[in-house]
Image (cartoon, rainbow, N blue to C red):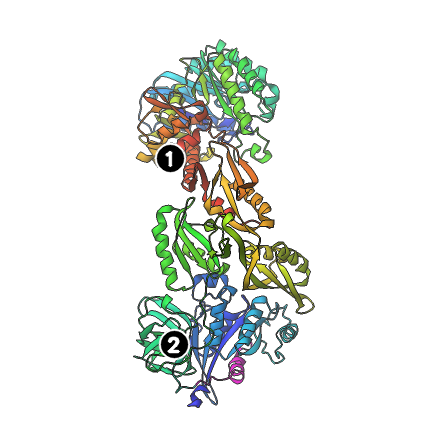
């Protein structure tokens, strides 16, 4: 019944942070009458607090909208995409579940790097791209300029792009028709063996893992035995149905072209891989859907409880977070300086920040984190290869033939006046200039190849401050490149502090070592004895600072029996002491570990 | 032991380094204030006390007869056969007023000398010269004070250990029996906090302290507390009571007291104090943990130290050269005194 699918449209929205994706989604929900305005929390699709605060969508969600018009009742499945480069693969799977996408561009700001990256991704997946110009109510809106930009940069027709304001509700009414008339209906063979694409999952404490799927071919009914083709896991479908904005709408079957959920008593999200294909055990498909890949963390960091006694709390918190985040990896790790903690792997920097913030905020655990590291490919003199994500585990220099580090393709979009300064930044970060493109008279797209380890410290911050926040940035892994890398150790009173070691390019080791030594000098309180701070490569000292010995720490006055000042001071010192870590004979405050993470450029 | 402290928060003029509560130009309030102090004293049941201390501010800004009357009234309720101290500023006393005070019953006077170098006194904006200060000491002695204490300040910008020793030597040649030596520190909310004069490096400041200690010890003054030196038998009883965690009644605006296991603090606001019926602004009932910490915090300041209670941090601090055994007691070493806060924190953590 091809007719059935003719009334389905599966689409997503591509937009830069703040360009109005969530607001637009809300308007579409209102328009299709599913949620009354009054019941609706703002920006329904972003349902994590953190997402709402940052104005970004971290995890994909989907929602089924029903829209009636003269020629019938249409099902519009809006599949939301995470808006950040760290979740590139997840975005690609969400897009693979759609036939088209709304490209939402801010009428005042134009196209941003992230938008471009996701649009290219959508084009790769043969999606129909429908441009929409949002925020036309802004005084600084320049819809014509933005239209031209879309045509020039992306190469798609934008003349008839609707001019809307999601916030003010301007011109929203035309969108359903725009979607229905321009996005192709799905056309999968519903009598073929089942092939359903997993584009998201999350853990529900009652139903187990909820699997979000797009049925490409065949159909699925309650009670069916299903198999995940990549992992081989087999489960019985306990419940399936559609995704309404306010919850689940169970049904008996899901058919080709449809988007919905499956619950099959699956215990952990690890059993459910985004991008995997669901098929039926009884009549399995011969081939899975294309595009599945294992996602591997790119950025690693040691996470330790500030209060060592909370190690178990931290473990539980990580377990809980992992329930809903298959891409988070962690394993126990011990540091001489920081005690017991976890080595955690993240998809990227934002992912790392989000996890750290959720641990601190939702689980109330103060953390000490080590400098983020990428994975180095180390070729040893005996020809064997090891991958190292913790500088402490690097083999001795004498056993290393050479090292390789990951490089990324980076695209930076920015107003023309900042080009010089940003090129300088990229150069400074060992970037290899590839290309520069004028998007329009005022804006430029810079393409660099950059070593990932230069990005993970403070590249975003540096970029922001050099462009007054007007640049957008996007990167993806390119390849491993042989590189002249060294391990930089920091020594306090002659002892290496493992949590402060990291890998750095030899040309930068000297400056970096000196900066960290200076920072440590400022953050380590004076001790009973003089504490030398040294930066060393191998056995060679490249920088030295000294924390002078504590000479005086005594209060004199106590007039009239007023001991409150003494008490306050004592309380302060007690608190400070509790926050100290003992490394050898030296007490180091937690802040010292953190402050070296933020080296301004 | 129990002491009685009376706070008289009046000054001729505020010194730029002083963060203690006092006001200047409030002469009209003197009678009402004294009246209110007497009224406040009635909240405490009559009892003999071991020491009485009139502190400030500058108590001698008040007319000596008023101080005399106040003391007389208080003595009716709190008889005292021990040390009765009044603080004085050289610019606010005369031979006549000193005689009145001595006769009123004050047997100890604590004089804010601060320095016997005029350029240092000018820097501190004191209202008296070195000569005035020396004369006041002589006048006090002539008035019959046998127990005279002088305050000294060190750690002033540009000061040398020799400068400090000079003032100390000069003082010791005068009839003083007790010296309190304070290092200048910049307190929030003072004019110095705004001007932020550059204080000597810690190393230099300690050298001044050592120089001062050497000089005083050479003149027969023994250090009995981190900041206090006395000829044998002239240690300040009233202040020693603080270090021993003894109780004391505090009267007056901004006064602190410690009675029946409760530390309290009166309102700082002069007018609010005068018009109040209950002057207490802050009250802390001490817990066992508080008492434990205070014993270290206050007791260790004394040279004789405190009774060793088996605290497990002690051996380590002895090895580090910061504490030493002293009979049944433990006490700070000279190095330990320099960083007393550090040592105390290590002991109570």
Q: Secondary structure at mark 2?
A: strand
Residue occupied by mark 2: A278
- Relative vertical location of residue A41 with respect to residue B287 in this rendering, above or below: below
- Relative vertical location of residue A284 with respect to residue A305 in this rendering, above or below: below
Q: Is residue B62 visible?
A: no
Q: Is residue A485 left or right of residue B288?
A: right
Residue occupied by mark 1: B278
Say whether residue A186 is magenta.
yes
Q: Which residue: 63% across, 60% down?
A: A432
Q: Which residue: 54% across, 57% down?
A: A404
Image spot of residue A79 (x, y percent): 46, 74
Magenta-tinted stretch: A169-188
Front position in the image: B219 or B174: B219
Nearest-to-viewer mark from 2 and 1:
2
Q: Secondary structure at mark 1?
A: loop
Q: Which residue: 48% across, 45% down?
A: A591
Image spot of residue A578 (x, y percent): 40, 41
Image spot of residue A155 (x, y percent): 62, 76
* Letter of the chain that mark 1 sits on in the rendering: B
Label 2 close to label 1 by CB (< 8 Å):
no
- Relative vertical location of residue B17 with respect to residue A64 in this rendering, above or below: above
Q: Quadrant of the rendered structure where residue B3 is?
A: top left
- How far apart marks 2 and 1 lie (CA) works out to 78 Å
Image spot of residue A536 (x, y percent): 54, 43
Q: Is residue A511 left or right of residue A235?
A: right
* Letter of the chain that mark 2 sits on in the rendering: A
């Amino acid at each position: 019944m091809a007719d059935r699918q003719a009334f389905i449209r599966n689409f997503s929205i591509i937009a830069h942070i703040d360009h109005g994706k969530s607001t637009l989604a809300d308007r579409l929900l209102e328009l299709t009458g599913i949620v009354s305005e009054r019941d609706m929390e703002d920006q329904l699709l972003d349902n994590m607090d953190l997402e709402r605060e940052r104005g970004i969508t971290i995890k994909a969600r989907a929602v089924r909208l029903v829209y009636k018009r003269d020629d019938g009742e249409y099902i519009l499945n809006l599949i939301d995409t995470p808006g950040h480069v760290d979740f590139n693969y997840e975005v690609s799977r969400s897009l693979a579940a759609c036939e088209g996408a709304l490209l939402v561009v801010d009428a005042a700001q134009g196209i941003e790097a992230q938008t471009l990256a996701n649009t290219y991704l959508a084009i790769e997946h043969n999606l129909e791209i429908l441009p929409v110009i949002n925020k036309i109510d802004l005084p600084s809106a320049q819809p014509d300029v933005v239209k031209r930009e879309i045509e020039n940069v992306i190469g798609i027709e934008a003349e008839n792009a609707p001019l809307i304001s999601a916030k003010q509700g301007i011109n929203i009414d035309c969108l359903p028709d725009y979607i229905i008339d321009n996005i192709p209906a799905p056309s999968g063979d519903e009598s073929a063996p089942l092939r359903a694409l997993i584009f998201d999952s999350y853990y529900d404490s009652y139903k187990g893992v909820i699997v979000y799927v797009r049925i490409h071919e065949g159909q699925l009914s309650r009670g069916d035995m299903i198999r995940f083709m990549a992992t081989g896991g087999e489960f019985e479908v306990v419940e399936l149905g559609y995704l309404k904005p306010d919850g689940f709408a169970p049904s008996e079957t899901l058919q080709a072209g449809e988007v919905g959920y499956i619950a099959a008593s699956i215990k952990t999200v690890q059993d459910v891989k985004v991008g995997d294909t669901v098929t039926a055990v009884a009549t399995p498909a011969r081939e899975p859907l294309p595009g599945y890949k294992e996602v591997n963390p790119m950025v690693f960091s040691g996470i330790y409880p500030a209060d060592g006694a909370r190690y178990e709390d931290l473990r539980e918190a990580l377990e809980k977070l992992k329930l809903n985040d298959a891409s988070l990896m962690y394993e126990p790790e011990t540091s001489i300086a920081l005690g017991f903690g976890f080595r955690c792997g993240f998809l990227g920097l934002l992912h790392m920040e989000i996890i750290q913030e959720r641990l601190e905020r939702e689980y109330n655990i103060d953390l000490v984190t080590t400098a983020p590291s990428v994975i180095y490919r180390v070729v040893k003199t005996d020809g064997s290869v090891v991958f190292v994500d913790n500088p402490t585990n690097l083999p001795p220099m004498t056993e290393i033939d050479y090292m390789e580090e990951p490089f990324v393709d980076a695209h930076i979009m920015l107003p023309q006046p900042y080009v010089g300064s940003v090129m300088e930044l990229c150069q400074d970060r060992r970037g290899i200039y590839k290309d520069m493109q004028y998007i329009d008279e005022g804006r430029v797209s810079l393409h660099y190849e950059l070593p990932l380890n230069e990005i993970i410290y403070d590249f975003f911050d540096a970029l922001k401050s050099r462009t007054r926040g007007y640049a957008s940035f996007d990167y993806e892994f390119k390849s491993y490149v042989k590189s002249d890398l060294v391990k930089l150790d920091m020594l306090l009173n002659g002892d290496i502090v493992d949590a402060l070691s990291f890998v750095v390019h030899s040309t930068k080791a000297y400056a970096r070592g000196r900066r960290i030594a200076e920072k440590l000098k400022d953050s380590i309180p004076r001790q009973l004895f003089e504490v030398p701070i040294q930066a060393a490569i191998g056995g060679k000292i490249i920088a030295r600072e000294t924390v002078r010995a504590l000479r005086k720490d005594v209060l004199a006055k106590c007039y009239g029996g007023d001991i409150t000042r003494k008490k306050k001071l004592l309380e302060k010192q007690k608190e400070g002491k509790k926050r100290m870590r003992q490394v050898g004979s030296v007490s180091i405050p937690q802040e010292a570990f953190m402050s070296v993470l933020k080296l301004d450029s | 032991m129990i002491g009685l402290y009376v706070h008289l928060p009046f000054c001729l003029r505020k010194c730029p380094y002083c963060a203690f509560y006092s006001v200047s130009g409030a002469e009209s309030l003197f009678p009402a204030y004294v009246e209110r102090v007497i009224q406040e004293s009635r909240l405490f049941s009559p009892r003999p006390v071991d020491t009485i201390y009139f502190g400030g501010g500058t108590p001698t800004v008040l007319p000596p007869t008023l101080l005399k009357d106040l003391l007389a009234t208080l003595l009716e309720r709190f008889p005292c056969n021990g040390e009765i101290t009044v603080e004085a500023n050289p610019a606010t006393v005369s031979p006549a007023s000193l005689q009145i005070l001595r006769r009123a019953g004050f047997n100890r006077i604590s004089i804010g000398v601060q320095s016997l170098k005029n350029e240092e006194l000018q820097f501190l904006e004191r209202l008296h010269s070195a000569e005035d200060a020396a004369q006041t000491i002589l006048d006090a002695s002539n008035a019959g004070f046998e127990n005279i204490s002088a305050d000294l300040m060190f750690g002033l910008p540009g000061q040398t250990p020799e400068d400090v020793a000079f003032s100390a030597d000069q003082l010791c040649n005068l009839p003083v029996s007790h010296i309190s030596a304070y290092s200048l520190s910049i307190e929030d909310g003072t004019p110095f906090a705004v001007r932020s004069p550059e204080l000597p490096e810690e190393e230099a400041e300690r050298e001044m302290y050592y120089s001062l200690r050497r000089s005083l010890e050479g003149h027969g003054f023994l250090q009995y507390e981190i900041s206090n030196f006395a000829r044998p038998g002239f240690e300040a009883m009233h202040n020693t009571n603080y270090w021993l965690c003894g109780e004391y009644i505090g009267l007056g605006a901004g006064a602190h007291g410690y009675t029946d296991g409760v530390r309290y603090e009166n309102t700082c606001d002069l007018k609010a104090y005068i018009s109040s019926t209950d002057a207490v602004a802050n009250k802390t009932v001490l817990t066992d943990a508080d008492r434990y910490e205070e014993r270290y915090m206050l007791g260790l300041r004394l040279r004789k130290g405190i009774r060793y209670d088996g605290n497990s941090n002690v051996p380590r601090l002895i090895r580090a050269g910061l504490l030493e055994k002293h009979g049944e007691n433990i006490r700070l070493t000279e190095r330990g005194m320099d960083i007393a806060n550090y040592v105390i924190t290590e002991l109570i953590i």
